[in-house]
Image: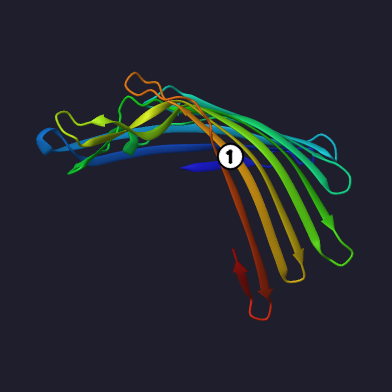
Amino acid sequence: MTGTLSNFFESDVIKLQLGYEFVNNNGFSLVSGENQIPLAVSERLENYDFFLSSEISCTERFSIRPGVRYSFQSLFENQYATSLGLRYLLNKGIELRTSLGRSYRTPNFEELYSRLIFSGHYFIGNERLIPETSNSYEASVKKTTVFASGAQMSSNLMASYLTVDDKIDMAFNGFAEGTSTPVYQYINVSKYRMWNVSSSHQFAYDNWMARLGASVIGVSQEIDNGSIISDDRFIYSLQLNGNVSYTVPKWNTTFSMY
């Protein structure tokens, strides 16, 4: 159940929104117990969240967007999330944005209690999982140009950095006792880090539109939970994307090529 309350003030300077989200999940599953005997698992996961967000227009060019969320948990310690976004408009269609935030994610029923055992593989949950917490930072600059011919071009450069403590993921956890059957289990990754630098460009004229983008991403995962240990080296990747589209107004149809 979710609801929001807004429009508290008749003001163009401050916009405020209050909200709530109540979640009550009753999970049930038949899992494989000892000697492949089916075992019924039934658990209730509840959280009752309240959140507040606002947009403050300090000037015609500068605005602030703060937010906070608090979650009352039935199975874990209570959690909270916060965010702060800033935007500044410069001349000649240039827009600057920056944001930072702190968030969380709690394990779901499958990650906690699932147990799939069949010939060749084990996939099991982990009741010892704890919520993951993350911190994110992002900055971007966008330039929009409108030409006399009616053509429009926008370019965006963005950089972001994300850290996650106790990230929930499935990992190889050894072999079943006395066999060569691999066992995969949900675990908390000790430290997860990712940085991303991306650039995107869009050009539109008449019924044509073209987009081109590129990003460089670095990911590091460090696992050290007593039974699994890994290093924290970054793995890098380059991603390129582009598309061209043409719209036929008479047919209300768009043709695209990626």
Horizontal and vertical percent position of residue 200: 69, 50
The residue that appears at 32% across and 21% down in the rendered structure is 227
Mark 1 — residue? 217
Q: Can you see residue 36?
A: yes
The residue that appears at 84% across and 66% down in the rendered structure is 150
Q: Nearer the viewer, residue 219 or 167?
A: 219
Using the image, determine if residue 153 lies above or below residue 179: below
Horizontal and vertical percent position of residue 86: 74, 34
Q: Nearer the viewer, residue 249 or 141?
A: 141
Say left or right for 128 vs 199: left
**Image quadrant occupied by the C terminus:** bottom right
Say left or right for 25 vs 49: left
SS at mark 1 in the image: strand
Q: Quadrant of residue 175?
A: top left
- Label 1 is placed on what type of residue? Ile
Q: Can you see residue 37?
A: no
Q: How many marks?
A: 1
Using the image, determine if residue 231 lies above or below residue 123: above
Q: Quadrant of residue 160?
A: top right
Horizontal and vertical percent position of residue 113: 28, 34
Q: Quadrant of residue 39?
A: top left
Local crowd at mark 1 within 10 Å, few (<14), some, or many (≥20)?
Answer: some
The residue that appears at 17% across and 28% down in the rendered structure is 177
